[in-house]
Amino acid sequence: MKYSLLLLRLSLGFYFAYAGLSKILNPEWTAAGFLKGAQTFKSLYAWFALPANIGWVNFINEWGLLVVGVLLILGFWVRYASIAGIVFMALYYFPSLNFPLAGEHAYIIDEHIIYITALLTLIAGQAGNYLGLDGRR
């Protein structure tokens, strides 16, 4: 069980770190198009996409994903990193939700819900204690 949690933590960590780093390294990247195409909570996501807001939204998105990933890889503050990852995944889930369709290939449950479930598993299993810095405190 411990090695399964370790593998899950590391794979999610690399997933989040890559997602953040790829956005940081691409000067053309912006969340504006994604936000403007929201199917649910349109006014909230349109507010995020406003020119006055998109700068901080992009910054939090890029660097937040990278920080979550690095913390998961290190096994440090896994509970907090997982909670932040859950918030990111929920914020990504709702714009593509056109109930009962979630994206192009799913009903209600899509990859974002799977990631949320995996992050909840890291919290419940105290995954940072297994070959992670949380276990060294």
Image (cartoon, rainbow, N blue to C red):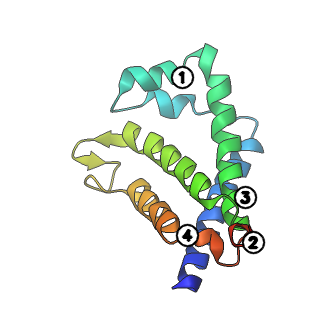
In terms of secondary structure, where does tag 1 sit? loop
The kind of residue tagged 1 is Ala
Q: Is mark 2 on a helix, strand or loop?
A: helix
Look at mark 3 in the image and give the residue it sits on: 70
Alpha carbon distance from label 4 to label 3: 17 Å
Q: From the top left corner, tell me how far across and down residue 76 is, in percent.
A: 70, 62
Quadrant (top left, top right, bottom left, bottom right) of the C terminus: bottom right
The kind of secondary structure element at disc 3 is helix
Q: Name the residue under label 2.
A: 136
- Mark 3, other Cα within 10 Å: few <14 / some 14–19 / many ≥20: many
The residue singled out by tag 4 in the image is: 126
At label 3, the amino acid type is: Val
Q: Determine whether 45 is above or below 73 in the image.
A: above
Name which residue lies at 56% across and 47% down.
84
Mark toward the viewer: 1 or 2: 2
Seen at 59% across and 85% down, the residue is: 3
In x, y percent, where is residue 107? Answer: 25, 54
Q: Which residue is drawn at 54% across and 23% down?
A: 49
Give the CA separation, mark 2 to mark 4.
13 Å
Q: Which of the labelled discs sits on residue 122, or is there none?
A: none
Q: Disc 1 or 4, which lies upstream in sequence?
A: 1
**Which is more N-terminal, label 2 or label 3?**
3
